[in-house]
Image: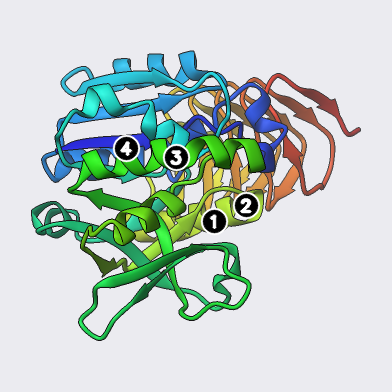
């Protein structure tokens, strides 16, 4: 079983962070989005990974190779942004005839990975949503077999949304469908999606069932990323590398503070993730994500997403600041 993790998107909804930092490497509850996905699959026994990268792909490659030296990781570059289906198609030669597990690189799900890996045939992970018009949806018959897949239906016949986890047994048919649909899709819309290819597989005789996930965390926007950070911190409890070394500082759990941080005369938490080697002084930070090598002086931050290598001085604000920035709010 090989796992494909597409992370080639530019992450435009998380600008300005994704100008210099890939979305997959944004810190989340003490980890990164990518590491949460890889850890989850590796713990279930997956050893072979294909990561499809694009914008800032070298950073992802360096991170993955350094953090996971014992895993077999292949990096595929999607130099032109032609959609998710195109990204998967680029993996054709590496996949061969093996079954694959596709896990989108901007979505974190809680589900029984072992059960999915051991299941027979192709499986689509789903979760019921209030408004399925923004998602791909799976229509099923009375026996639970998928009969149709529709991307962002205007009049949904079901509210079972595809969450971005796909186990594909008939990989040869998957690539054949993408190859068949891709020229017209790219000509008409500029990109090839994955849902139309999966629907083509259904029409071609492939048998799909669905599996419900327990939780689904969307990491595509600032608001949902902060919500996911808070939820995961509460679930995992957070991790503080040097709680006794923070001078005159109050920590309100749950928080995650990476190694090498210096914190003085501050209040941190709840629901805060701080990247490595950041310095925080005379500040209050809550419900926020702070990148690595960042310096905060005399500020009160809440509901904020702050990039790496950033310096902020000043007063109370709600901020969304990218990497390599210096702001004086005084």
Report the disc number at residue 286: 2
Q: Is residue 30 visible?
A: no
Whether residues under marks 2 and 3 lie with C-beta atoms below 8 angstroms apart, the answer is: no
Mark 3, residue position: 85
Whether residues under marks 1 and 3 lie with C-beta atoms below 8 angstroms apart, the answer is: no
Q: Residues within 10 Å of mark 3 (few under 14, many from 20)?
A: many
Measured as percent of width and height from the top left, residue 323 is found at 67, 24
**Observer-nearest residue: 41 or 54?**
54
Whether residues under marks 3 and 4 lie with C-beta atoms below 8 angstroms apart, the answer is: no
In space, the residues marked 4 and 2 are separated at their CA atoms by 46 Å
Mark 4, residue position: 175
Q: Residues within 10 Å of mark 4 (few under 14, many from 20)?
A: many
Mark 1, residue position: 270
Whether residues under marks 1 and 4 lie with C-beta atoms below 8 angstroms apart, the answer is: no
In space, the residues marked 3 and 4 are separated at their CA atoms by 9 Å
Measured as percent of width and height from the top left, residue 11 is found at 61, 36
Q: Nearer the viewer, mark 4 or mark 2?
A: 4
């Amino acid at each position: 079983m090989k796992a494909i993790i597409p992370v080639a998107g530019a992450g435009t909804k998380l600008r300005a962070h994704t100008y210099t930092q890939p979305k997959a490497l944004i810190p989340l509850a003490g980890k990164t989005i990518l590491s949460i996905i890889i850890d989850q699959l590796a713990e279930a026994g997956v050893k072979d990974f294909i990561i499809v990268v694009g914008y800032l792909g070298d950073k992802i490659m360096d991170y993955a190779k350094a953090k996971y030296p014992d895993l077999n990781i292949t990096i595929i570059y999607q130099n032109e942004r032609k959609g998710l289906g195109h990204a998967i198609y680029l993996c054709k030669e590496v996949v061969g005839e093996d079954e694959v597990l596709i896990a989108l690189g901007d979505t974190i799900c809680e589900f029984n990975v072992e059960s999915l890996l051991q299941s027979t045939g192709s499986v689509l992970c789903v979760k019921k949503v209030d408004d399925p018009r923004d998602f791909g949806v799976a229509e099923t018959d009375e026996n639970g077999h998928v009969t149709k897949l529709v991307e962002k239906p205007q009049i949904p016949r079901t509210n079972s949304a595809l969450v971005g986890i796909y186990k594909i047994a008939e990989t040869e048919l998957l690539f054949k469908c993408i190859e068949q649909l891709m020229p017209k899709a790219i000509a008409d819309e500029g990109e090839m999606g994955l849902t139309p290819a999966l629907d083509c597989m259904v029409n071609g005789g492939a048998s799909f069932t669905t599996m419900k996930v327990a939780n689904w965390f969307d990491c595509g926007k600032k608001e949902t990323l902060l919500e996911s950070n808070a939820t995961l911190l509460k679930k995992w409890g957070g991790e503080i590398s040097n709680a006794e070394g923070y001078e005159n500082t109050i920590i309100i759990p749950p928080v995650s503070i990476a190694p090498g941080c210096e914190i003085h005369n501050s209040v941190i938490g709840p629901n805060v993730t701080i990247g490595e080697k950041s310095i925080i002084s005379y500040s209050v930070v809550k419900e926020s994500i702070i990148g690595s090598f960042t310096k905060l002086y005399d500020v009160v931050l809440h509901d904020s997403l702050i990039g790496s290598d950033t310096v902020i001085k000043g007063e109370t604000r709600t901020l969304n600041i990218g990497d390599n920035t210096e702001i004086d709010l005084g």
